[in-house]
Image (cartoon, grey):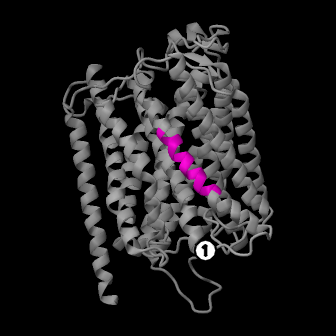
Amino acid sequence: MATAGTAAAPAAAGTVSPYRVCLETGLHVDLAAQRLIKANAFVAVVFLAIGGLFGLTVALTRWQTVHLLGSEWFYLALTAHGADVLLFWIIFFEIAILYFASAVLLNCRLATPKIAWLGFVLMVVGALLANVAVLQGDSSVMFTSYVPLKAAPHFYLGLILFAVGALIGCFVFFGTLVIAKEEGTYEGSIPLVTFGALTAAIIAVFTIASGAIILIPTFLWSIGLITEIDSMVYKVVWWGMGHSSQQINVSAMVACWYAIAAMTVGAKPLSEKVSRTAFLFYILFLQLASAHHLLVEPGVSSEWKIFNTSYAMYLAVLGSMIHGMSVPGAIEAAQRRNGFVKGTFEWLRKAPWGNPAFASMFMSLVFFGFLGGISGVVMGVEQINILIHNTLYVPGHFHGTVVAGTTLAFMGITYAVIPLIWQREIVWKGLARWQPYLFGFGAAGISVFMMGSGIVGVSRRHWDINFADATLKFDYAPIAHLMLGLNGLSAILATIGGVAFVLIVLMSIFFGAKRDAAAVKANPTVVAGTPVAHSGSEGTLKLPGTIILVAVFFTTFVVYYFVNWKFLSDVWPLR
């Protein structure tokens, strides 16, 4: 992309907004939106670096041979890791995605840029306040911050300010969609990527409302204005934020899958209507999956548990399965259209695996499905959940969704948009080709080995699996120590990949070669005629490779599902 100068963007209401024209996509890029995208994405990457390093110290502490931190520092690092990567890194980046999917993809000016900057400042101040509170040592309440654990007041205040800022970002996104519609800056329906971002924003409003409902009284409790917070009420409402925030991630991640597939190989969804319906299932049902954190709680009824973890959740899972077939199917259809028609899998063998955006996206798709998706359904079964609740299986699962899934996808879209938004070349292209594989396989290893240690019963949050200070001695089976050692090695590999990503991004946006018209012509980063900003469907199901891949997934799913029922049957005699 190259700057084509500053001009007045077309606006039916006579509004003037500086913009530039992208030479690769032809889109009008509102400069106010561009600055906000840059700011949110930059801060997101900073928090990814901070939170990732805290995560490495946690993994090296769980590796008993290393056992890096003492108990106080372990819980401090665990709290900071959870807040920085599950909330701050992810949501800052998602706000950048919302602005890109609205103002940029719809050729539209951003609604109320000054208010958007207010939201950004609130998010930064809130994230810094929460981190300061944790580092001061009095707020090691971990990600869930369950009462009666009490953090410093500015920990809760920081989370509240961050949530308000994120909510402002969502409303700016909604306002931008209204402006685009009124000013006619796009034709037909909004693009599927924008629809996915809309899904994420709608779920975000529900999520942030849940956080406000519980965090505001908890803040008042921390300063002494409220005498007590009911622990069961706290858990139910808090998980409306804690787990639903991850459903924002799923929606944004899938939108990135579609965007990267379009940008790298020119893929269009098999059926836009079906894909949009799958996103609708997310809005209606996905956040109900938070119930799986409450399946062993006595304070909620069995009827509520069964409904939320069966009928409602199955429809959310159906949405993910639709995307899980549509994305590789769209890639296969595009590759066959591009001439890769030999055999069943030439389209996959000759996919652009050297492009870090594509590699990140496809590994995110595979890891999310096989690791995060299958394990999530198993965890959501009321009966099976008792086997793995509060073991390391739980964080193993969400490392499969949020790290090997969402974070890897966000890395991929970063590689795709740095040339488009920052107008600079990616530096260290050799390292960039390898980075997704280093991080991806490291993150997948973390997920697998944490789930493996959880299966043999390792506690979710205990800092010392040898229980050295316990009055009654206890030790896990030797396989648990092996699993946590492999988890530590995987964390080191993921950290190497994560550090490489951070360095590549920072060096690219500050020192990468400028992309002028000649550079764009010599080295285009987006497939000509990319459908990412347009509507349309492939309209074919002649996808033999995708059908085989889907069959492998379903076979794995069914086998693993029933293996867990076998595990459950082994404990029935204990009743």
Place of residue 547 in the rendered image (x, y in percent of width and height, measured from the top left): 21, 40
194 vs 458, nearest the viewer: 194
Place of residue 70 in the rendered image (x, y in percent of width and height, measured from the top left): 70, 72
Question: Where on the picture, by quarter, is residue 384?
Answer: bottom left
Q: Secondary structure at mark 1?
A: helix
Place of residue 33 in the rendered image (x, y in percent of width and height, measured from the top left): 64, 25
Residue carrying label 1: 231
Q: Is residue 77 left or right of residue 492?
A: right
As drawn, 49 above or below 303: above
Q: Pick the quarter of the image with the N terminus.
A: top right
Q: Is residue 299 left or right of residue 380?
A: right
Q: Main secondary structure of the magenta part?
A: helix
Place of residue 556 in the rendered image (x, y in percent of width and height, measured from the top left): 27, 56
Q: Is residue 32 visible?
A: yes
- Amino acid carrying mark 1 in the image: Ser
Question: What residue is shown at x 57% (from left), y 21% (from top)?
Answer: 420
Question: What residue is shown at x 48% (from left), y 80% (from top)?
Answer: 476
Q: Is residue 442 visible?
A: no
Q: Which residues are magenta?
A: 199-212
Q: Is residue 479 left or right of residue 101?
A: left
- Find out whether residue 176 is within the magenta segment: no
Q: Residues within 10 Å of mark 1 (few under 14, many from 20)?
A: few
As drawn, 565 above or below 208: below
- Find out whether residue 210 is within the magenta segment: yes
Question: What residue is shown at x 33% (from left), y 52% (from top)?
Answer: 315
305 vs 560, nearest the viewer: 305
Q: Pick the quarter of the image with the C terminus.
A: bottom left
